[in-house]
Image (tube, helix red, strand yellow):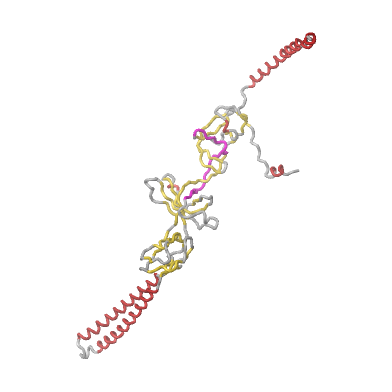
């Protein structure tokens, strides 16, 4: 048993000698590799792509928030006195034309009063005709002495009084005709009914509000603008208003408020909105909140891809690549944004090479390896690659 175990362990010294010889042979090559790595210098922290700022024309805009309100509202009330409302012809949201009948009151009592006034007018006109005839005869007999001066004066006075009674009776008829006209409530202008208080069967007193109407269906955006931006906005300018669901309307600045609210330090800018199309009609309603922007033209600006601008601790930075391939973190002022481009107001010039891809992983002084940006793939390549063969 011992003899067989010794026979199996006999090659162990030979194996150890072989391993020692191999390690001695590999030691010089390992030392040479370490020496070569030390001589090659520090490794690059990241492989990045770079770009230089480009000059583009960007729109000048001022953002604002405000409320959608009616351009003008009309309060439609009752001018009748103690009449019962018999019919209401419109409801909230209805489009009405100027002069259209909105509601009617009971007119039986008014018609009776009008008939009585007309009868009184006929009686006054008959008495006036008789008084005029008597006065004419008195004037004819004035020179003959058949009538005294007092009698002639009485006939002439009776004629004037009869004329006055006719005029009074005509005024009563006109008043009753006006009351009859007031039994129909009509729209003072074209527009949209925004509120209805009229109830069939109610007895409304004079001055009671029955309807409220948005005149001509016109809406406006009352934007709140800071005092700093207020001088930049002029009447007749363009504003784009955006509703909560994303629908947009382009309006025109009608007026800039002459005063600033002393509490909020905002001024109102009134923007007329065009008549909303069918798709946008539900998006813009009086009383809703909306955001928007005032368009002031455009100007030239230095822009960089959005991914080149890194935000850290609330400030914007870019990483400029120096000739030694080390990056320097530069604080910049970001301005307007359009699509994937960001305006750089200050901090760099048009000749600076700025890291684009990988900027978010770098620190000041890092060594980078610069590579060319990949060319955009043709529009049909993705479709061809996805097509089964």
Residue 353 seen from this side? no
Q: Position of residue 314 (x, y in %)?
A: 49, 35
Q: Is residue 73 among what the camera can see? A: yes
Q: Residue at x 37, y 71 (%)?
A: 179
Horizontal side of 368 relative to 187 (left or right) equals right
Span shown in magenta = 289-313
Q: Position of residue 53 (x, y in %)?
A: 56, 37
| Rendered view: 258 above or below 163 | above
* Vertical relation: 251 (above or below) 360: below
Is 297 within the magenta?
yes
The x, y position of residue 312, in whole percent, is 51, 33
The quarter of the picture where the C terminus appears is top right
**Which sits in the foreground, 68 or 344?**
68
Residue 389 in the figure: left or right of residue 340: right
Single out the residue that lies furthest toward the front: 1
Return the x and y of residue 363 as percentages of the image width and height: 55, 29
Q: Quadrant of residue 184?
A: bottom left
Seen in the image, is 311 located left or right of residue 13?
left
**Quadrant of the drawing holding the N terminus:** top right
- Compared with 266, 101 (above or below) is below
* Magenta span contains residue 20: no
Name the main secondary structure of what is drawn in magenta.
strand
Q: Residue 175: which quarter of the image?
A: bottom left
**In the rendered image of this protein, does residue 208 appear above or below residue 360?**
below
* Marker count (numbered): 0
């Amino acid at each position: 048993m011992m003899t067989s175990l010794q026979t199996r362990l006999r090659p162990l010294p030979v194996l150890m000698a072989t391993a020692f010889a191999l390690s001695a042979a590999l030691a010089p090559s390992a030392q040479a590799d370490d020496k070569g790595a030390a001589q090659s210098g520090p490794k690059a922290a990241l492989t990045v792509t770079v770009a230089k700022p480009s000059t583009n024309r960007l729109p000048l805009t001022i953002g604002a928030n405000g409320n959608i309100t009616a351009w003008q509202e009309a309060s439609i009330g009752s001018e009748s006195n103690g009449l019962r409302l018999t019919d209401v012809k419109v409801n909230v949201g209805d489009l009405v034309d100027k002069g259209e009948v909105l509601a009617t009151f009971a007119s039986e009592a008014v018609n009776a009063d009008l008939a009585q006034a007309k009868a009184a007018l006929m009686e006054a006109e008959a008495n006036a005709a008789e008084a005029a005839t008597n006065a004419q005869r008195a004037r004819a007999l004035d020179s003959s002495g058949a009538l005294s001066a007092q009698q002639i004066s009485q006939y002439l006075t009776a004629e004037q009084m009869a004329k006055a009674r006719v005029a009074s009776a005509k005024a009563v008829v006109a008043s009753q005709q006006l009351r009859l006209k007031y039994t129909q409530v009509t729209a003072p202008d074209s527009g949209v009914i925004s509120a209805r208080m009229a109830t069939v069967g109610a007895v409304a007193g004079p001055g009671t509000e029955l309807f409220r109407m948005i005149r001509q269906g016109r809406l406006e955006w009352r934007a709140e603008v800071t005092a700093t931006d207020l001088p930049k906005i002029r009447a007749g300018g363009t504003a784009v208003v955006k509703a909560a669901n994303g629908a947009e309307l382009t309006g025109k600045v009608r007026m800039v408020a002459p005063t600033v609210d002393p509490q909020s330090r905002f001024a109102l800018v009134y923007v007329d909105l065009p008549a909303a199309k069918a798709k946008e009609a539900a998006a813009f309603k009086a009383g809703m909140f909306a955001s928007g922007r005032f368009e002031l033209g455009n100007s030239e600006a230095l822009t960089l891809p959005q991914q080149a601008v890194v935000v850290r601790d609330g400030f914007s930075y870019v990483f400029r690549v120096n000739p030694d391939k080390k990056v320097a973190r530069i604080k910049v002022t970001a301005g307007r944004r359009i699509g994937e481009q960001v305006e750089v107001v200050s901090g760099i010039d048009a000749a600076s090479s700025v890291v684009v891809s990988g900027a978010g992983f770098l620190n000041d002084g890092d060594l980078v390896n610069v590579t060319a940006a990949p060319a955009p793939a043709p529009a049909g390549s993705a479709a061809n690659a996805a097509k089964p063969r």
